Image (cartoon, rainbow, N blue to C red):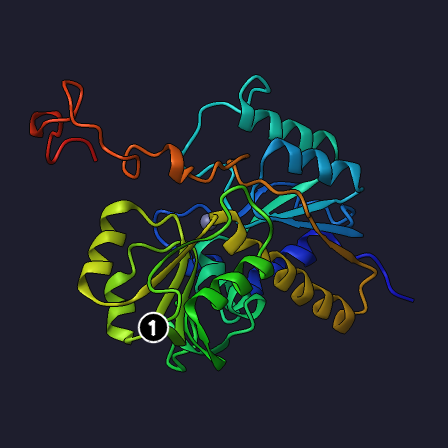
Amino acid sequence: MPAQPALFEVIAALDALWPRERAEQWDAVGTVCGDVTDPEARVSRVLFAVDPVQQIADEAVATGAQLLVTHHPLYLRGTTTVAADTFKGRVVHTLIRGGVALHVAHTNADTAEPGVSDALASALGLRVLRPLVPDPADPAGRRGLGRICELDRPLALGDLLEAAAAALPVTAQGIRVAGDPTATVRTVAVCGGSGDSLFDAVRAAGVDAYLTADLRHHPASEAREHSPLALLDAAHFATEWPWCEQAAAQLDAIAEREGWDLRTRVSRTVTDPWTAHAPSLPQASPLTSPVTPGPTAPTAHDLTPGAPN
Ligand SMILES: [Zn+2]
């Protein structure tokens, strides 16, 4: 007869999947709230989500979860208050009052094997070859940040863009691309979350394309000037959400092995902060309108080179 596991047993299983000591120094992972000292605290339902925001805390309570596992930390830096009139304090109150523990696996889940970028590659139907930035502490060379992948068959960049847009959660941003849509893509580097600090590794890998999130102007512009590397920029949330399904499946497998009466659920709430996106209107753009010479025509003085970032 399967029995409901204690909270501390489930947390120990999560720690085995994503050991806390493998998180970056600046990160804040592990159990945020929940009485892991109470052997009577049982878990029958676990909710997985990307962001520990109020909507997700409410969802955890409404769906009867006793444990919420998120990728992003609630508190990344120290705090002096969990008062309910702060938005993070309100999340803590909602969770504790609702009998829900919160556990975070962030950079320790990024570099795990399988990790966040394995889930992203899998969602995109890519075959993982190796980490983009291997973890030097892993002699097997399987853990690390990002993944270098290959396609089952070469695709035009435009087709890869459409396939990626169809495979990832719907967000206001969709996916932006930089590159010739007819260029052939055989190899892709992927990194779930903000990936523009990894351009050196991406260039060294010699891949045809790089799919990540939060690409800023200067790193993206410089990468494009440097080589014909194609860029695909998705919403941060969309690149990390596939990890929730992978993580839930990992806990399901443990529950089956241990004979636990435990059900997992993945939140389908989109917590990408952006809510709408207007495509540019070429007919209205000042850069494509016919220029009418005259007193209002722009002069060289109207442009201030090197102004804002
Ligand atoms: Zn993230």
Q: Position of residue 33 (x, y in %)?
A: 61, 39
* Position of the C terminus by quadrant: top left
Residue that lies at the very extreme toward the right in this rendered image: 1
| Residue 235 vs residue 283, the one in the foreground | 283
Q: Position of residue 185 (x, y in %)?
A: 40, 75
Residue 163 appears in the picture as rendered: yes
Give left or right: position of 175 versus 252. left
| Residue 196 vs residue 95, the one in the foreground | 196
* Residue bearing the label numbered 1: 208
| Residue at x 53% of width, y 21% of height | 86
Q: How crowded is mark 1: few (under 14 residues within 10 Å), some or many (20 or more)?
A: many
| Residue 199 vs residue 108, the one in the foreground | 199
Question: Relative to 277, does residue 244 appear above or below in the rendering?
Answer: below
* Position of the N terminus by quadrant: bottom right
| Residue at x 53% of width, y 61% of height | 162
Q: Where is residue 209 in the image (x, y as percent from the top left)?
A: 36, 68
Query: Which structural element holds mark 1?
Result: loop
Give left or right: position of 199 versus 88. left
Give left or right: position of 287 versus 171. left
Q: Position of residue 267 (x, y in %)?
A: 68, 48
Residue 13 appears in the picture as rendered: no
Q: Is mark 1 within 8 Å of ligand 1?
A: no
Residue 182, quarter of picture = bottom left
| Residue at x 69% of width, y 58% of height | 9
| Residue at x 67% of width, y 60% of height | 248
Q: What is the tally of numbered marks visible in this picture? A: 1
Question: Relative to 18, does residue 44 appear above or below in the rendering?
Answer: above
Question: Relative to 146, does residue 213 appear above or below in the rendering?
Answer: above
Question: Relative to 25, does residue 127 appear above or below in the rendering?
Answer: below
Give left or right: position of 186 versus 41. left
Residue that lies at the very extreme toward the left in this rendered image: 301
Q: What residue type is labelled 1?
A: Asp
